[in-house]
Amino acid sequence: MTNNLLKIILADDDEADRLLFKEAFFELKSGITIETVNDGMELMNLMHSTKSEDLPQILFLDINMPQKTGMDCLKEIRADDRFKNVSIAIYSTSSSEKDMEQTFIHGANVYIHKPNSFEKLKRVLEKAIINAKVYQDPPFNKENFLLNA
Amino acid sequence: MENQKLHIKYMVSLRCIMVVKEELRDLGIKYVNVNLGEVELLESISKQQMESLRTNLKKIGLELLEDKRNILINKIKSEVVALIHHSDSVLKVNFSEYLSNRLGYDYTYLSNLFSDVMGITIQQFIIFNKIEKVKELLLYNELNLTEISYKLDYSSVSHLSNQFKKVTGLTPSYFKHMRELRQAQLK
């Protein structure tokens, strides 16, 4: 059993949101390394230049980013077999079921509706991380990893 | 905190102790004590040091055993997985009794050890496994939800549906629908 270092990448163009996320992870638990990028282009460059064994277990992806949106990144990542073990958590300000559906259909694992309080944010991130950890080992099947956090 | 201990298999002579001490020194690992089969470390070591040590010991015919706690946790996991995923009978089990009988430890001890290391309780791990099994059975299309709830020993369909919703945020039928849409999309 590999004990229990989890690597996360967060892509968000909003600096305040990035800080909030990092703060929430920081308060949650140690054993998580988190890297942040400012937009979709930067994210894809980072993903492509990362060695397979250093890829994150989970990627948090803001849906609304300039140039390359979260949805574009999602499709690009899911089209590349090298990234098949990376779980993807989408977060969005939209609570419409249709938007959630579109991300699930294109291979997202977690849908997070951006919460309006810090405590709630901590709770949903924790839930996403626990799930991502559980789905690392068989018999859990990543294809069946769908979570509305 | 108690010092970390490493356990080494096939370590049978004084000569072995000398050789192991030498290997530890070479890798810069500080130890308190080296006895037959056991090394007490002064400070915790990195994963990389652990792996180098494992490789070097193997070359001289010794085997570094996994941490006892990890061995026990892996046993708990495989017992749970075997019961839920690899058994065809109805899941009528008292898990705490079963685990403590099978592994020979008090359940409270097992349960504390598990949550300390895993960050979730055994109970939560069992629920995750049951929900994963529900997902699998749903996609097979052989059993309906009532039959699935019976097979996995839920008291009712609504109990199963509520637990499914609590764990995944989705209803069982919505999950199934999404998986089928995704399958179609990726083809």
Image (tube, rainbow, N blue to C red):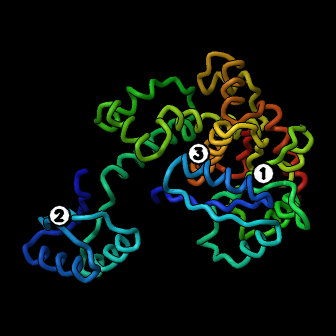
Q: Nearer the viewer, residue B183 or B48?
A: B48
* Kind of residue indicated by mark 1: Ile
Residue shown at 59%/22% (left/top)?
B153
Instruction: Check disc 2 and report the residue beneath it.
Output: B37
* Kind of residue indicated by mark 3: Ile
Residue shown at 89%/48% (left/top)?
A102
x, y (%) of residue B24? Answer: 23, 76
User: For the residues tagged 3 and 2, is the chain the same?
Assistant: no
Where's the C terminus of chain B, which quadrant?
bottom right
**Residue B133 in view (yes/no):** no
**Residue B96 in view (yes/no):** yes
Q: In screen coordinates, is A128 left or right of B76?
A: right
Q: Nearer the viewer, residue A6 or B105?
A: A6
User: For the residues tagged 1 and 3, is the chain the same?
Assistant: yes
Instruction: Check disc 1 and report the residue beneath it.
Output: A90
* Kind of residue indicated by mark 2: Gly
Q: CA distance from mark 1 to mark 2?
A: 49 Å
Badge 2: chain ID: B
Q: Nearer the viewer, residue A43 or B55?
A: A43
